[in-house]
Amino acid sequence: MSKCEQCIIKQFNSLKSLTKDELVRISSCKTSKIIKKGEVIFEEGENLNGVYCVKDGICKLSKLSENGKDQIVKMVVKGQLLGQRSLISEESSNLQAIALNDMEVCFIPKSEIIADLQKNPKFSFDVLKDMAHDLKEADDIIVNMAQKSVKQRLAETLVYIHDSFGVNPDGTLSVLLSREDYANIVGTATESAIRVLSQLKKEGLISTVGKYIKIENLQGLKRVE
Amino acid sequence: MSKCEQCIIKQFNSLKSLTKDELVRISSCKTSKIIKKGEVIFEEGENLNGVYCVKDGICKLSKLSENGKDQIVKMVVKGQLLGQRSLISEESSNLQAIALNDMEVCFIPKSEIIADLQKNPKFSFDVLKDMAHDLKEADDIIVNMAQKSVKQRLAETLVYIHDSFGVNPDGTLSVLLSREDYANIVGTATESAIRVLSQLKKEGLISTVGKYIKIENLQGLKRVE
DNA sequence: TTTTAAATATGATATTTGTCATGTTTTCTG
DNA sequence: CAGAAAACATGACAAATATCATATTTAAAA
């Protein structure tokens, strides 16, 4: 099994603030997992016994609404941690995590993480910074949900995915989402999301290559009213 | 000036995890402020040089949307801290804070808080827990915004205010908000908020005493479809 | 490969919510 | 206290979005 001390991924998240000793200890009790596209990593309401460090792939965090629809709240990619929030507040998870493509993750047991949080102030400050960033993003999403049109939100989502997760060699968005996923991010009906995507295509702001979406006019997307 | 070590308010927030020494030090450099109803505590985009500990009163945290509407993201009451997020991520504030009634706050300089965060793991873990809680709340709001009707959201807001901030002796909600504030919490037009409140009144779920709102049927409000 | 199921697409229509107009009531200010 | 301004209220209509129906295309499975 690979060693945390040598793992390049930790550079991208709070684990970088752990000491060599702490990393060695974590390395000895972590477990590595392969998760296939579409598989559930954890369920809403499940008690997490640790955090996941995402070595490769991407997943969606969503919450089931009372009307039966899934609302996607956040996406977590390679390099990021998964499950810290519920671990810290010692509650069951309020979100469900599902892999959007094949993933490789390391699972680190709760006791290790908590111990390090309580002993290593640099680490806990780093986690705190991450959480502060997530909170700001969440606040922005609230404002967008409340004040912007479906078309604007969808355009912003495309820009967000482009900027945050990058593109394939042919220029298409590297993250492949179904129309239903887009609808669940934006908080609208699947049909509405499809309609708006068709509209953006007609307007020449995006194009499609099979199921993949390519942004043709980034500035134009940002200006969508 | 009152002393932090003896202040009862700290029991309700993370400051309770500070040592006596740390509290004495904070006490010596904090400043106390009275803020009148309607006054701005800090603006969106402003650099905060510390955090506020709310000794009395309540304020709203909002963000101006591009369409000119204010979206209220959170309310902060007596006992809670204000401004930690932007302080931790070392960014200017993404929200504006306005007093909803007369407030008494203590301002604690950034350097003190940061120093304690980096030295006292118990304190930083406590702040982390708070932030995790805020993040969960924000996630829930996102889901509600995306999936629930204006009527449902407004009903839930009333229940939330009732449960979190309590009632006056006559049973009316202790937090007094304008119809515009309600609209800005729910993310709807002021007229729509007014209409829905009238409707809830007609249905006997709430009543009004002057500008104050009284919940007549809490269970009924929770069941609003 | 064939068959079946799922995802995508689009029209027609219903519902929700926003906007504008206007009137009333409450609150503030000189 | 009077007048002005703000907040509240409600109707009429417009716009945005959801829902339902039904093709069509794509992917999965037998």
Image (tube, coloured by chain):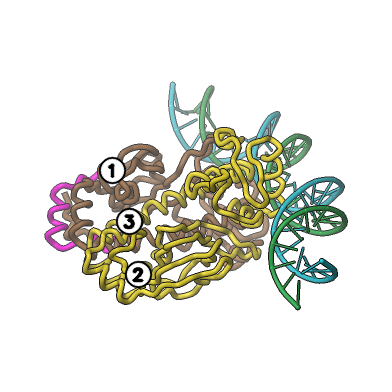
Chain colours: A brown, B yellow, C green, D cyan
- The secondary element bearing badge 3 is classed as helix
Where residue A208 sits in the image (x, y, percent)? 56, 53
For disc 3, the chain is B
Residue where numbered disc 3 is placed? B11
- The secondary element bearing badge 2 is classed as loop
Identify which amino acid the numbered label 2 is placed on.
Ser
Residue where numbered disc 1 is placed? A34
Structural distance between the alpha carbons of marks 1 and 2: 57 Å
Q: Are marks 1 and 2 on the same chain?
A: no
For disc 1, the chain is A
Q: Which residues are magenta?
A: A9-34
Magenta stretch holds residue B140: no
Nearer to me, B24 or A110: B24
Among the two numbered marks 2 and 3 on one chain, the one whose residue lies closer to the N terminus: 2
Query: Which residue is depicted at the point 23% across and 56% down?
Result: A117
Residue where numbered disc 2 is placed? B2
Query: Which residue is depicted at the point 46% across and 69% down?
Result: B93
Identify which amino acid the numbered label 3 is placed on.
Gln
Q: Is B24 positioned to the left or the right of B59 in the image?
A: left
Identify which amino acid the numbered label 1 is placed on.
Ile
Query: Which residue is depicted at the point 70% across and 40% down?
Result: B199
Where residue A209 sits in the image (x, y, percent)? 54, 52
